[in-house]
Image (cartoon, rainbow, N blue to C red):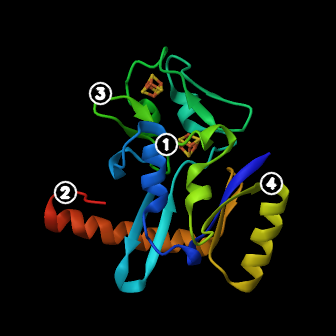
Amino acid sequence: MFVLAVIYENCTGCHLCELACSFKHHGVFDLSLSRITILTKPEVQTSVQVYCLQCQDAACERVCPVDAISRDKNGAYIINYDRCIGCRECAYACPFGAISFEVEARPIKCDLCEGEPECAAVCPHDAIVYMEEKKAARELKKAKAAGVAYGLYGGKETSEHPRKKAEEAVEYLLELVEKSGELDI
Ligand code: SF4
Ligand code: SF4
């Protein structure tokens, strides 16, 4: 099984992954249609990638009242739009904010691009890497020992450091929202 691993310290906040994601899935460059979100806090040069962890025990799958979410052969949770009734329960249940909506209230989330994630392919700084799960776990161990901010997105583990960075970035965004009345990322 391959998983998406992220090296937070490599991310420059260029948003290329978001643009590539929206183009791959929707044919347009539109940050609001990306299934990955980059939270940035320029004052402390922090950028954090937020997206689906493809949890081992996924809340989104559990709460869906019409069993519209299931795992595919690549380990990605996929939404079956023939079944989905647009109730938003999956988005409310996801603890990571990894499900958003298109204008017609259609939920969208990372589907690992059928095993060829565009975000990992396009990232110019290797901040998102799609790698074999065991190799990713070994890399995580090494990174932790070296004090590098690193996260393993496969429902297994993320180091404390990136979580802290994520919290800071979220706090910053909330401040922005309070100031401007809208979230502009
Ligand atoms: S959408 Fe959320 S709950 Fe569902 S698998 Fe992804 S991270 Fe887990
Ligand atoms: S919005 Fe669709 S996929 Fe999400 S819980 Fe409701 S029916 Fe299931």
Q: Which residue is mark 1?
A: 24
Q: Is residue 74 left or right of residue 112?
A: right
Give the Cα distance between marks 3 and 1: 19 Å
**Residues at marks 2 and 3 touching, judged by CB atoms closer than 8 Å:** no
N-terminal of the pair, mark 2 or mark 1, is: 1
For marks 3 and 1, give the one nearer the viewer. Answer: 1
Rendered-image quadrant of the N terminus: top right
Q: Secondary structure at mark 3?
A: loop
Q: Quadrant of ligand 2?
A: top left
| Residue 101 lies in quadrant | top left
Q: Indicate the position of residue 37 as horizontal and vertical percent values.
A: 43, 56
| Callout 2 crowding tier (Cα within 10 Å): few <14, some 14–19, many ≥20 | few
| Callout 4 crowding tier (Cα within 10 Å): few <14, some 14–19, many ≥20 | few
N-terminal of the pair, mark 3 or mark 1, is: 1
| Callout 3 crowding tier (Cα within 10 Å): few <14, some 14–19, many ≥20 | few
Residue type for callout 3: Glu
N-terminal of the pair, mark 2 or mark 3, is: 3
Q: Indicate the position of residue 112 as horizontal and vertical percent values.
A: 62, 43
- Which residue is farthest front? 27
Q: Secondary structure at mark 1?
A: helix
Give the Cα distance between marks 3 and 4: 36 Å
| Residue 134 lies in quadrant | bottom right
Q: Indicate the position of residue 178 as horizontal and vertical percent values.
A: 18, 65
Can you tell which mark lies on residue 132?
A: 4
Q: Residue at x 41, y 32 (%)?
A: 107
Give the Cα distance between marks 4 and 1: 23 Å
For marks 4 and 2, give the one nearer the viewer. Answer: 4
For marks 2 and 1, give the one nearer the viewer. Answer: 1
Can you tell which mark lies on residue 182?
A: 2
Residue type for callout 2: Glu
